[in-house]
Amino acid sequence: MAYELFYWPGIQGRGEFIRLAFEDAGVAYDDVARGPQGVKAVAGILRGEGFEGTAPFAPPVLRHASLVIAQVANILHYVAPKIGLAPTDEAGQHRALQLQLTVADLVSEAHDTHHPVGTALYYEDQKPEARRRAVGFVSQRLVKFVGYFEGAIERNGASGWLVGEAASYVDLSLFQVVEGLRYAFPRAMAAVEPKAPRVVALHDRVAERAGIAAYLASPRRIAFNEKGIFRRYPELDLAPGEE
Amino acid sequence: MAYELFYWPGIQGRGEFIRLAFEDAGVAYDDVARGPQGVKAVAGILRGEGFEGTAPFAPPVLRHASLVIAQVANILHYVAPKIGLAPTDEAGQHRALQLQLTVADLVSEAHDTHHPVGTALYYEDQKPEARRRAVGFVSQRLVKFVGYFEGAIERNGASGWLVGEAASYVDLSLFQVVEGLRYAFPRAMAAVEPKAPRVVALHDRVAERAGIAAYLASPRRIAFNEKGIFRRYPELDLAPGEE
């Protein structure tokens, strides 16, 4: 049974967390909207065409045989045990899901630095609000989240991963978050990373894994850009404590 | 094994989604911070005291024997199958989790109407931004979310519930969202509800369930207030299309 991913073809976005899992595991998947069907495939799946059961609210969406599911953490919680990227015990699976949902919260807050008023407006129509939100994000939330993940790795023991003894999908997602934060907020990350050596080490270990290294060097890896979640706007690239 | 919930004792907040599941199922649980330990219990669990494994980033937190887990959807995904409030098949469980995560997205957006700039600031320090965000929330997002859940119930068939043939934790959560939106945005809900008869009917059926009806009439149900997620600020109580 093939895995089909439905996501916007021009951005990393939330779909990237799914792509990384498949790429790391070396499992074939069809990134459908990057093929001949294009974004029409995403529109169709959002309308619930071609399958039964709950329709998605938003992409990314995974189709696997007759099952169609949405929400990043839900997709990973479903697929990761099948491709060797999840803990095998119930407690570990719930710890992984908890951490993935915390990653999702961080991702949403990072997104809202450039869209604090609403997704229906352009960034250019909410720049003063974005600046205010970025100040709080960089000075408080980013610092708190990165510190939290640093503590989670430490608390998990000597493995250096977030849950259990082996790498799981959550580690891949934390790698992606570090990549995104470095792109969008390089000055803040330069200040924060020296206090989070375990997060940096985890990031580096993920980048060196065979599947991930090959993916990052391939044309399949879309570059960060200003249509995605992590955007580099110089006026929002603040250091912690800067107003 | 007793279930212990760690959440702020003075608000419904995100903890309410957990409380509703236990109350509906008639399963005993300890709402720890409302007992003698008070909020110190929440602070301790957030520091990771007294257990091994991943610490929470934020409440609500559930402790069940040696397992301590956070994130509303994760807690419900763990506990609901054990108390008869989840689908029993894998597909149904992932559809429920998907819908619960969509509820969580709606809850976060409702929260951000009064805190668009940041949680570290008071509402009074972000009132103009809050007004702008509320305009977009009421006119676009609230309408879209409620319409989505209406379609999800319809697509699920004749049962009138969101997933499968029986009520699940997701139905209780949608009830809670309707309650919260009615409290915070009564004018918008008055405009939207006539177009969402299935959502209203589901809400009413949940309210009549024995465990829920008893809970709502008890002192255990905290009233909505302006420290929670759903807040009634007259200046944000807009009708769709109002600026």
Image: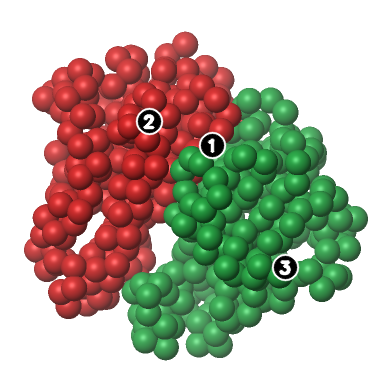
Chain colours: A green, B red
Q: Is residue B68 visible?
A: yes
Q: Which residue is mark 2?
A: B169
For residue B143, side relative to residue A37 (left or right): left
Above or below A172: residue A121? below
* Chain containing mark 2: B
Above or below A150: residue A228? below
Q: Nearer the viewer, residue B42 or B153?
A: B153
Amino acid carrying mark 3 in the image:
Gly
Residue A197 location, x and y as percent? 73, 57
State how far apart marks 3 and 2 are (Cα).
Answer: 38 Å
Q: Which residue is mark 1?
A: B94
Other-residue count near label 3 (Cα within 10 Å), few / some / many at <14 / 14–19 / ≥20: few
Task: State the quadrant of the N terminus of chain A.
Answer: top right
Residue B159 location, x and y as percent? 33, 29
Q: Which residue is mark 3?
A: A35
Q: Quadrant of residue B158?
A: top left
Disc 2 element: helix
Q: Is residue A105 visible?
A: no
Q: Nearer the viewer, residue B234 or A68?
A: A68
Q: Quadrant of residue B34?
A: top left
